[in-house]
Amino acid sequence: MDRRMFVLSAGATVATLGFLPGRVGFSQGDGVNVSSNLLLLGTDYYPDQTPEHLWEDDAVQMAAMGITNVRIAEFAWALMEPREGFFHFEWLERSVKILNAHGIAVILGTPTAAPPSWLSKKYPEILIVNEHGVTLTYGSRRFTCPTNKTYRKLSLTIATEMAKRFASTPGVAGWQIDNELTLGSDARCYCRFCGEGFQAWTREKYKTLEAVNEAWGTVFWSNTYTDWTQIPVPLPSGAPTNPGLMLDYDRYQSYANVSYLEEQLMVLRRECPKHFITTNNLPGVVDTIDARDLYRKLDFVSADNYPGFFALFFGGQSTSSVASFAHDFSRSAKDGKPFMIMEEQSGKAGQPYFSPQPEPGQIRLWTYQAVAHGAMGINYFRWDTANFGAEEYWHGMIRHDRSHSPGFDEMRQTIKELKSLGHEALNAPYVAEVALCFDSNSDWALTIQPSQMNLKYATELMTWYGCVGASNAGVDIVDATKDLSQYKVLYAPVMYIVTKQQAERIRSFVQGGGTFVAGFRLGVKEENDRVVDTPLPGLLRDVMGVEVLDTQPIYSEKQGVKFSGMLAGNEAECKVWSDILDPKGADVLATYTTGQYAGKAAITSHGFGKGKAIYVGAHLEPADLARVLLTLSATSGVKVTADVPRGVEITTRRSNKGTLTYLLNYNAAPVSVKVAGKMKDALSGAAVSETVSLEGYGVRVLEGA
């Protein structure tokens, strides 16, 4: 993968592997279950890139620092199959044996993100064709077509051979399929095989050409299809391509990658029924694959977390907020199930250039940030820093000269602390009072037709998340297709596409007493990416109690917004976009102050059933938006934590054994935080009341209340 690209758009028990003496046998009959047998606190290890005479020393050092598992082999296809049909696993078996002898479990990675050169040279048809029609060359990774049958067959073969070889091998605990699907310089493929796959997928979805033509509106520009083979991939074509076709193609590419993974999953389930199976990605940050579909049949979500890169590329966004969002989405993708960080930044990170060394305390802080949001395991990337290859500046836990990295002792201490918290704490449910809607359909459709050059779905989503997260009430990330009754508030920024299923879920939620807060461009399109033929906001018009009188992209001329009622306060400026609202039973909470729509409604509130629906038609600056959204939370029964210093986050995980409250300080300077009632520091055992001190980049874990 080109990692530079991914951001552009119970006490210690015998179940804790690190405290078990000697070998750890995870064979097929052992009944391995990640939720009960193993704490996943480890590192990503590359014996394929490390001289074999160093493997024993590596295992000794890992065991000494408390590491319980390693992930290995996800990029070692060329060593495992040096030529077609000839398999060589002996080296890998030796590595697993050494690790197992030191009580370190192994997660094996199927190596299909980086095929051997012999394969790529022999079968050039496996190469991605990018969105410009250019065929990629081999020599890196993530350059293969997800549809191509040859590559699928070869991938399934190596995965099958690995599964059969290691199904009963002591020490093997689970599998990671592939690596970071779609996370490369070219996330989608537009080759002829994908064209044929898309035609077959379209036929399965729509059944008839008449239905396709109707759904996409192909009569426009004379694009009516009379044969399935006429349906193209959306390569450059002189003018913008049909948006319905483009959205379905994005859906197909997500499907192709998920089905590619599921072929390997079927084999691993059959051959290794006692092993857990996952895959890693950056859920919520990488949006070219539907993560809910990706993880649906896997045992748990595994995510990668590189806050240093977030700091480099998310210029205007809070690094901590971006990471927290990714963690919340990782947990939410499988309906609240604890997730794993398969790759956690352990030092400087980069390829041609790299992020700074984390400040003392930051690696521990990032680790606890994940745990505070629902993680049950952490693997630090990577063990030893490579002396060669594209990631030789992606620093690990030990340096190029094999000395300990600046963060080594910090990671050792953090692992020790997490073991002391134990299984119960690391698998405790996360407490969330509110939800934020993130839907791939709206994301992809708005990317196709943003309507204003500076309007980006990801930016709006992250901004709303940052504002909502400031309440410290806990946030789940949902797509509004399931029951929402557990939440007090549902926020939906730029819900551009609203399906009938989503509309019914939201309607039921509000009728039952929930608060729905929607942003501008609500319900503009239906699921086929056609503009609705009713007044906006379309399917939710009755719930919102308004009609959209007009929509205005804003460029040089800015629009003022005056607040009233429960939102009364300083006037704000509206940039990028404004929906002009015509109340049809809704109360006005803000109006525009300039231009032809001065005095018209910008924000409204409508009582519907037992609940209410708020339409935020104006694009507000983050500070103004935060005031609005936090006010709406507080008036909807959400317990907004007051007097929390800026840059401090509070989360809660609750199990049958009690409540753990995590206090995280993202500031370099110390802060003090007020707490309610008497509590105990879960790590030191010290009593805490009234005020808690947090050092710079500090963490406190409190029991009680």
Image (cartoon, rainbow, N blue to C red):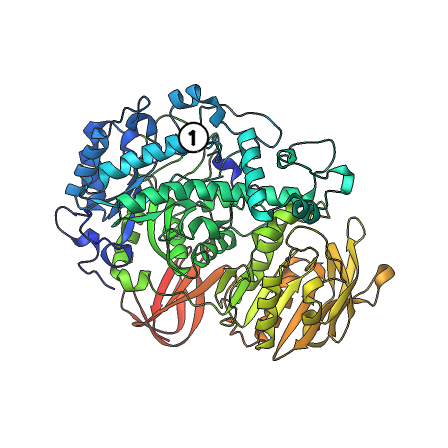
* Residue of label 1: 151
Residue 382 in sight from this viewpoint: yes
Say which residue appears at 68% left-offset and 64% top-offset: 539
| Residue 667 visible somewhere in the drawing | no
Question: Viewed as shown, does residue 461 lie left or right of 365?
Answer: right
- The quarter of the rendered structure image containing the C terminus is bottom left
- Position of residue 388 relative to residue 412, above or below, is above
| Residue drawn at 40 percent across, 55 percent down | 370
Residue reaching furthest right?
A: 596
Camera-nearest residue between 437 and 255? 255
**Which residue occupies the foreground of this view, 330 or 294?**
294
Left or right of 165: which side holds 572? right
Measured from the top left, where is residue 211 in percent x and y? 66, 48
Q: Relative to 394, is 118 above or below? A: above
Q: Nearer the viewer, residue 681 or 268?
A: 268
Q: Position of residue 242 (x, y in %)?
A: 70, 41
SS for callout 1: helix
Count the marks: how many?
A: 1
495, above or below 159, in the image: below
Q: Quadrant of residue 11?
A: bottom left
In the image, 137 versus 432, the foreground residue is 137
In this view, the residue farthest toward the left is 22
**Label 1 sits on what residue type?**
Tyr
Location of residue 134 in the rendering, given as x and y in whole percent from the top left corner: 59, 25
Return the residue found at the far bottom.
Answer: 610
Task: Locate residue 564, reporting x and y percent.
Answer: 73, 74
Mark 1, Cα crowd under 10 Å, few <14 / some 14-19 / many 20+, is many
